[in-house]
């Protein structure tokens, strides 16, 4: 009878221990940490500094892209005006070349000023 009473506490501890160990990961997974501060800490300052540095480093690239877009727009806008002038030209040999965006002479293929 002593063996039974000795085994019972061991089994009870094993069962309780397993149940506790099984509950620990679930509790650990659901744990959330809430940090309340004014938002002025070293991490946020470092993140802000890195973002500002990246913004400054890409400034030159952004300007290049914007200049390129503006240049392409100006080119298309000028071509539109030139096409209108070419089509309304009194020169019967003048025609608009859409691939080169130029007004050309039909006989020579040279650019014509409409």
Image (tube, rainbow, N blue to C red):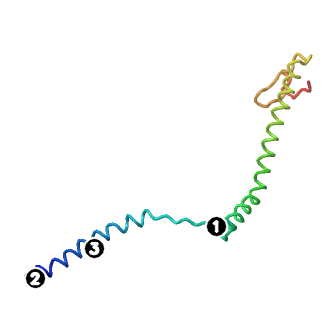
Per the model, the C-alpha gap separating discs 1 and 3 is 39 Å
Which residue is painted at 79% across and 31% down in the image?
100
Residue 3 located left or right of residue 110: left
The x, y position of residue 55, in whole percent, is: 74, 58
Q: For residue 37, which numbered disc appears in the image?
A: 1
**Residue displayed at 80% across by 30% down:** 101
Looking at the picture, does residue 63 appear above or below residue 26? above
Q: In this view, does 2 lie above or below 104?
A: below
Q: Is residue 45 left or right of residue 10?
A: right
Identify the element where label 1 is drawn: loop
The mark nearer the N terminus, 1 or 2, is 2
Between 3 and 47, the residue placed more toward the observer is 3
- Mark 1 surroundings: few (<14), some (14-19) or many (≥20) residues within 10 A: few
Where residue 96 sits, quadrant-wise, is top right
In this view, the residue farthest toward the left is 1
Disc 2: which residue: 3
Q: Residue at 15%, 82% (x, y): give it.
A: 6
Task: From the viewer's side, name the closer residue of 78 and 109.
Answer: 78
Q: Is mark 3 on a helix, strand or loop?
A: helix
Residue matched to label 3: 17
Chain-order first, disc 2 or disc 3: 2
Q: Where is residue 57 in the image (x, y as percent from the top left)?
A: 75, 60
Apparent side of residue 3 relative to residue 19 in the rendered image (left or right): left
In the rendered structure, which disc, 1 or 3, sits on the residue that comes first in sequence?
3
Instruction: Tell me the CA gap for discs 2 and 3.
Output: 21 Å
User: What percent of the width, then of the height, locates residue 15?
Assistant: 23, 71
């Amino acid at each position: 009878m002593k063996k039974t009473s000795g085994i019972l506490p061991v089994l009870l501890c094993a069962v309780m221990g397993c149940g506790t160990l099984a509950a620990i990961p679930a509790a650990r997974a659901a744990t959330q940490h809430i940090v309340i501060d004014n938002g002025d800490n070293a991490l946020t300052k470092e993140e802000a500094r890195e973002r500002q540095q990246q913004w400054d480093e890409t400034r030159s690239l952004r300007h290049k892209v914007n200049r390129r877009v503006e240049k392409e727009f100006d080119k298309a806008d000028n071509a539109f005006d030139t096409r209108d002038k070419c089509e309304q030209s009194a020169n019967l040999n003048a025609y608009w070349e859409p691939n080169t965006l130029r007004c050309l002479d039909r006989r020579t293929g040279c650019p014509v000023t409409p």
